[in-house]
Amino acid sequence: MVWDDLRVFLAVHRLGSYKSAARALGVDATTVGRRIGTLETALGTRLFLRTPDRLQSTAAGLKLVPRAERMEAEALELERELQADDSKLEGSVRVTAPDGFVQYILLPALSRFRREHPRLCIEFRADVRVLDLSRREADVAVRLFRPKEPALVARRLGELRFALFASEAYLERRAAPRKLSALAAHDFIGADASLDDLPHAKWLRRAIPKARYALRANSTTAQALACTEGHGIALLPTFVAAREPKLLPVLPRLAGPTREVWAVTHADLRTSARTVAFVNWLVGLSL
């Protein structure tokens, strides 16, 4: 039994399928299945049963979970300590951030960082999920909230402002609304229903209680593209509109919501040269 097999086992246990585990681990589903088969053969027992909804851990699998998690915690702690001791500005930095932030803020500004640190490779994971920094799913996270976990270190990057936007073609076709009440007659582009609890999504529901959605998506880039193509009005970060000339403000005097932006790392990585360099660059960005 090797650590890689246990890591695959934990991913399947947590996510409930080979496909989801493969996506999280960056491998293909057949590799995951092969690893689980190897582990089951070594242990002489079944670890998962297939149900209509997901792969369910057997009794033997459930017994293995806490032991595998202890090994995971030890391996990750060692990995963080070794990386923290590494003073070389070379290797990889894994960064998770909202997709819109990656496309409209980080990538356009990355050239200067690459010139200063040509031996670093930045691995972006544009994800709506909050990845686990303790499990090394990422080295640095850009988050729109301040974390509460004591093992995480956060630095404030600034504040994002949101406003309503639409394309010129849409406003010519439907006429620009002159007051808030007129928005009820318009089509909207919004976040996927799974993101309804986000503060800016709640603001939109309060401002337009009966918004008529023409399109919903779980990524900012998809919402922005739909808006530029004239499908409706969208609540977007103002940095998106700054890079999309087709977008025009709707009710520009309306004060939209704001979100704080934080750069987050695990405390064990606070002395890692790679992590420090990237976080310092983030702090210097203009939002």
Image (tube, rainbow, N blue to C red):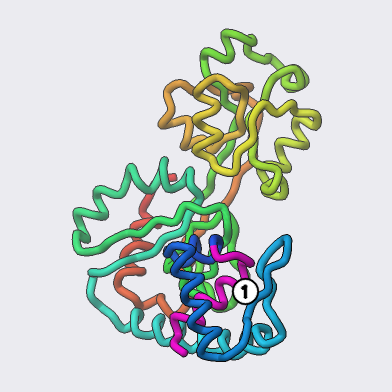
Q: Is residue 208 left or right of residue 136?
A: right
Asked whether 159 falls inside the magenta stretch, the response is no
Q: Is residue 155 in sight in this rendering?
A: no
Quadrant position of the C terminus in the picture: top left
Crowd band around label 1 with a 10 angstrom C-alpha radius: few (<14), some (14–19), many (20+): many
Of residue 218 and residue 101, the one placed in the foreground of this image is 218
Among all residues in the image, which is located at the extreme right?
209
Q: Amino acid at mark 1?
A: His
Q: Is residue 41 in sight in this rendering?
A: yes
Asked whether 4 falls inside the magenta stretch, the response is yes
- 115 in relation to 235, above or below: below
Q: Is residue 11 left or right of residue 270?
A: right
Q: Secondary structure at mark 1?
A: helix
Q: Is residue 88 left or right of residue 66?
A: left
Residue at the location (57% across, 8% down)?
172
- 20 in relation to 177, above or below: below
Q: Position of residue 191 (x, y in %)?
A: 64, 40
Task: Classify residue 59 by image quadrant.
Answer: bottom right
Of residue 86 and residue 74, the one placed in the foreground of this image is 74
Our reading of the magenta stretch's main secondary structure is helix
Residue at the location (57% across, 77% down)?
10
Residue at the location (55% across, 72% down)?
11
- 244 in relation to 11, above or below: above
- 137 in relation to 144, above or below: below
**Count of numbered marks:** 1
Task: Provide the residue span drawn in magenta.
Answer: 1-18
Residue at the location (60% across, 38% down)?
217
Task: Classify residue 284 by image quadrant.
Answer: bottom left
Report which residue position mark 1 lands on: 13
Q: Position of residue 207 (x, y in %)?
A: 75, 32
Q: Position of residue 259 (x, y in %)?
A: 59, 48
